[in-house]
Each structure stands twice: as C-alpha cells, then as structure tokens.
C-alpha cells in the first residue's frame, strides 16, 4: 500500500468511527487538516479547490465533523473559526493552548503544554474556559 492509500484509509476509519459517512469530500477535508496547524474555512477551501470541492461543501463538512467530535473549532480572538483534528485518547477533553503571532497571525498548537490539576481547578473559578491563548511574536517575526 502506498502512502496515499494508507492516509485515505486512516481518514475513512476516523470518519466512520465518528458515525459519519466517509464521503470523498470529508476524506479530503480531514487529510487537509492532518498534521496541520488549525486552518480557517477559507484555508481548507483553497487546499481542496484543486480536487473540485466547493466552499459550501467544505463548510458543511467542517461543521458536520465538529458535531461528530472529529474536529474542534476554535476562535482565537480574530473572529475567525479555525478547525483542527481532535487527537488522542481523551477525545472529549483533549485541549491544548494555542500560540498566536500578533504580527503574521500564524497559529501554532502547543500540544506539549499541559495544565496542572491545580490550574484546572483554579480556572473553573472564573467560569467555563473554552480557549487558552498565548500571544507573541513567532520565530519568523521576532
Ligand atoms: Zn509571525
Ligand atoms: Zn491546536
């Protein structure tokens, strides 16, 4: 099996496991987000345009996959939804901080950072935390 076949069967399995039908467009959407930083609807659409998948289809599939807990949707302070694959064992709760560059807008996943139990408990004193965001200048913009 070549790499592309392996990737596609990975995507099909992920989608079917979430209870959705693994359509060509959904498989392509998931592959666009694989090993990627969180992408906006426009960014995903640009990547899928060459496969002939239109923006409305991309939008519908992104939202379907958010509902199916396959993707997470984040709003990082610029009023744009960004989508990323929910990875790992702890699907419902797996969350990590994001780093946003204030100069170029690049978003990075800080997968390796984990909140301590104490900070999780403390943050619930303020309300329901939906997003942890760090801002700064990325390596390209320093
Ligand atoms: Zn930057
Ligand atoms: Zn992320």
Image (cartoon, rainbow, N blue to C red):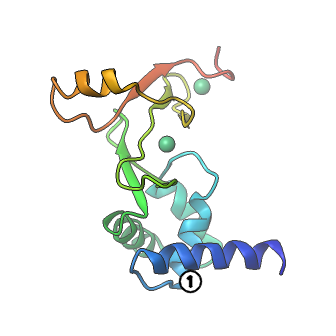
In the picture, residue 79 is in which quadrant?
A: top left
Q: Is residue 71 above or below residue 127?
A: below
Hey, which residue is sitting farthest top in the picture? Answer: 142
Q: Report if residue 31 is visible in the image.
A: yes
- Residue under numbered circle 1: 24
Label 1 environment density (alpha carbons within 10 Å; few <14, some 14–19, many ≥20): few
Figure quadrant of the C terminus = top right
Give percent across and percent down for residue 73.
37, 52
Q: Is residue 139 above or below residue 18?
A: above
Q: Is residue 57 above or below residue 77?
A: below
9 and 48: which is toward the camera: 9
Give percent across and percent down for residue 21.
44, 86
Hey, which residue is sitting farthest right in the picture? Answer: 2
Give percent across and percent down for residue 51.
63, 77
In the displayed structure image, the side of residue 108 where residue 8 appears, left or right: right
Q: Report if residue 53 is visible in the image.
A: no
Q: Residue at x 39, y 80 (%)?
A: 19
């Amino acid at each position: 099996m070549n790499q592309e076949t392996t990737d596609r069967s990975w995507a099909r399995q992920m989608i079917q496991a979430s209870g959705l039908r693994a359509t060509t467009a959904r498989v392509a959407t998931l592959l666009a987000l694989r090993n990627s930083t969180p992408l906006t609807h426009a960014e995903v659409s640009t990547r899928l345009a060459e496969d002939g998948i239109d923006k409305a289809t991309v939008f519908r599939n992104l939202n379907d996959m958010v509902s199916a807990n396959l993707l997470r949707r984040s709003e990082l302070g610029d009023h744009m939804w960004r989508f990323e694959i929910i990875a790992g064992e702890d699907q419902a709760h797996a969350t990590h901080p994001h780093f946003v560059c204030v100069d170029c807008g690049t978003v990075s996943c800080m997968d390796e950072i984990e909140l301590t139990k104490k900070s999780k408990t403390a943050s619930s004193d303020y309300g329901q935390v939906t997003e942890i965001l760090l801002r700064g200048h990325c390596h390209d913009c320093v």
